């Protein structure tokens, strides 16, 4: 390698570092400004939100099935990696063409501004939404210019022409290092400011909430509702293990003192409730299993919890639903919209505006201060988190977020079962070994669960005692395992007599079907 080519490579590397540092400083400044403002989404998250909304349905399904609750981390990481790559590219180009680098930076900032202005999670006026972008441009562009200029400071002269290309003189590494340290300090200051300002007000608000004793407690759990099988999913899912699937890349910050729930639309009396109003109403406690429509056969996007809340049917009765209504359009604090059949909210299934989960105020990521919990329906048509609005209407009058993307308007949860023990590809010892799992059929209840080995006859399992028809049931079968490779399959039959179909269907438009199976080796 000639000295000239070595110098060129070093300058390109320095240019890439300059672009990354400038981009980091700009993003850090934007994050700090957005943390200081209410109802403003940072440019980075605004771009990620637009990516979520624009992604085709198959991409969303693949992401949820592949990454589960980690899909948000993967998406944000992908956005960061993309921005970093473009910033580094701008820096490399800027070594010789600084105006082009500035143009690339301004184009990226323009995309961020467009995302911030159209972000559905932002509630602030447009002028405030743009303030983080202004910080991004001001700090990031100034940092880029300073760093690129430091690369122009000559340390020694190089030949003016090599293979016909003009090359800049060798740059002063010390000058570049000083500039890089200064920009790095700006980025670090932005990060520290974001951390200092970024604690959600809702966290402090939640810490001050005391949930009253419910007027209608859940019945005692039957003694036999839980089976003691190692590895079997617990009957009640802990809050920190409960699945989370939503489009909120940053949990909405909704303190109770600013929260209200508006009930309006096709009603005789519009109602607006504060959190204190909810606490003073008749609270009921119910154990209910929730299921995501994105749950594949055998998946873990399902959980069972104890919820406390106000029956939605009582709120709607007080509002006075008018004839002709058949739906309720619910809206979250980040402007997510969900459409729920009116009948599911007014019958006797105990649909709730829930304020507590497993004995404590709702966790921030699960909807604090209030969310919907509707037994028997997949979450995308029933489980609005960070709930702020209920509009009584007709399905034909609006497009909800997920139904506008090809999912069904009405989506009752399908009878399902899952094998938890043994895990797929497990190695087990020959002899008696438990095969166990959970099954659910909301609004109906589970009547029977069967397991078969290698396509042979079906064997009825032992069911745990039923808690209620809106929760799953554990089951276990003692298998006399023989050496070799085996396939285990499970199917459930609900109390109506319906038995799960073996036909595999995708999750869209209204939930997957098929028998869960695991492959094991017996030694």
Image (cartoon, rainbow, N blue to C red):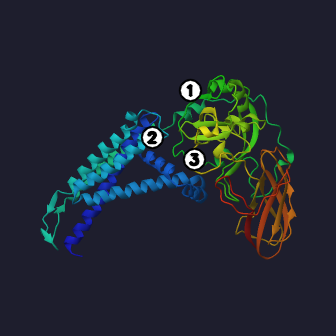
Q: Residues within 10 Å of mark 2 (few under 14, many from 20)?
A: many
Residue at numbered disc 1: 257
Residue contact at pointers 1 and 3, CB within 8 angstroms: no
At x 51%, y 43%, the residue is 250
Q: Inspect this view and state whether residue 402 appears.
A: no
Q: Inspect this view and state whether residue 84 appears.
A: yes
Label disc, if present, on residue 41 of the rendered structure: 2
Q: Nearer the viewer, mark 1 or mark 2?
A: 2
Residue at numbered disc 3: 404
Circle 3 SS class: helix
Label disc, if present, on residue 493 of the rendered structure: none
Circle 2 SS class: loop
Residue 98 lies left or right of residue 243; in this view the side is left
Residue 128 lies left or right of residue 328; in this view the side is left
Residue contact at pointers 1 and 2, CB within 8 angstroms: no
Total labels: the figure holds 3
Q: Residues within 10 Å of mark 3 (few under 14, many from 20)?
A: few
Percent from the top left, x then y, of residue 491? 80, 60
Quadrant the N terminus occupies:
bottom left
Query: Which of the 4 image quadrants contains residue 86?
Result: bottom left
Give the camera-side residue of 407 and 389. 407
Residue 435 lies left or right of residue 148; in this view the side is right
């Amino acid at each position: 390698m000639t000295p000239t080519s070595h110098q060129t490579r070093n300058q390109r590397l320095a240019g890439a570092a300059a672009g990354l540092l400038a981009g980091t400083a700009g993003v850090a400044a934007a994050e700090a400004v957005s943390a200081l403002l209410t109802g403003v989404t940072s440019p980075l998250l605004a771009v990620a939100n637009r990516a979520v909304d624009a992604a085709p349905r198959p991409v969303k399904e693949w992401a949820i099935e592949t990454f589960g609750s980690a899909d948000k981390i993967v998406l944000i990481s992908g956005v960061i990696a993309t921005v970093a790559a473009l910033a580094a590219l701008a820096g490399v180009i800027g070594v010789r063409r600084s105006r082009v680098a500035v143009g690339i930076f301004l184009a990226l900032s323009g995309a961020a501004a467009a995302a911030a202005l159209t972000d559905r999670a932002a509630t602030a006026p447009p002028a405030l939404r743009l303030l983080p972008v202004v910080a991004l441009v001001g700090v990031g562009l100034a940092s880029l210019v300073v760093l690129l200029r430091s690369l122009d400071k000559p340390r020694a002269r190089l030949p003016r022409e090599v293979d016909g290309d003009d090359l800049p003189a060798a740059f002063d590494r010390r000058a570049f290092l000083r500039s890089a340290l200064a920009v790095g300090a700006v980025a670090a200051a932005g990060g520290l400011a974001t951390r200092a300002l970024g604690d959600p007000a809702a966290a402090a608000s939640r810490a001050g909430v005391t949930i009253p004793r419910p007027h209608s407690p859940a019945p005692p759990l039957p003694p036999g509702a839980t089976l003691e099988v190692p590895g079997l999913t617990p009957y009640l899912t802990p809050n920190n293990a409960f699945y989370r699937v939503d489009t909120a890349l940053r949990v909405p910050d909704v303190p109770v003192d600013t929260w209200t729930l508006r009930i309006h639309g096709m009603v005789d009396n519009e109602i607006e409730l504060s959190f204190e109003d909810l606490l003073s109403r008749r609270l009921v406690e119910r154990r209910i299993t929730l299921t995501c429509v994105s749950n594949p056969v055998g998946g873990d996007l399902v959980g069972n919890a104890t919820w406390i809340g106000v029956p939605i049917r009582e709120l709607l009765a007080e509002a006075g639903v008018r004839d002709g209504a058949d739906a309720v359009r619910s809206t979250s604090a980040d402007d997510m919209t969900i459409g729920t059949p009116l009948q599911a909210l007014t019958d006797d299934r105990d649909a709730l505006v829930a304020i507590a989960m497993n004995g404590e105020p709702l966790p921030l990521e699960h909807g604090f201060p209030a969310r919907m919990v509707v037994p028997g329906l997949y979450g995308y048509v029933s489980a609005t988190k960070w709930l702020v609005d209920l509009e009584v209407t007709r399905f034909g009058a609006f497009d909800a977020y997920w139904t506008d993307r090809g999912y069904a308007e009405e989506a009752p949860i399908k009878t399902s079962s899952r094998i938890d023990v043994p895990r797929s590809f497990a190695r087990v010892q020959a002899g008696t070994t438990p095969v166990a799992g959970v099954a659910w059929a909301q609004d109906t209840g589970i009547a029977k669960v069967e397991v078969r080995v290698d396509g042979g006859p079906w064997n009825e399992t032992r069911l745990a005692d039923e808690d209620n028809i809106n929760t799953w049931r554990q089951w276990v079968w003692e298998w006399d395992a023989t050496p070799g490779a085996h396939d285990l399959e499970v199917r459930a039959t609900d109390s109506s007599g319906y038995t799960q179909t073996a036909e595999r269907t995708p999750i869209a438009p209204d939930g997957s079907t098929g028998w869960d199976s695991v492959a094991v080796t017996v030694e």
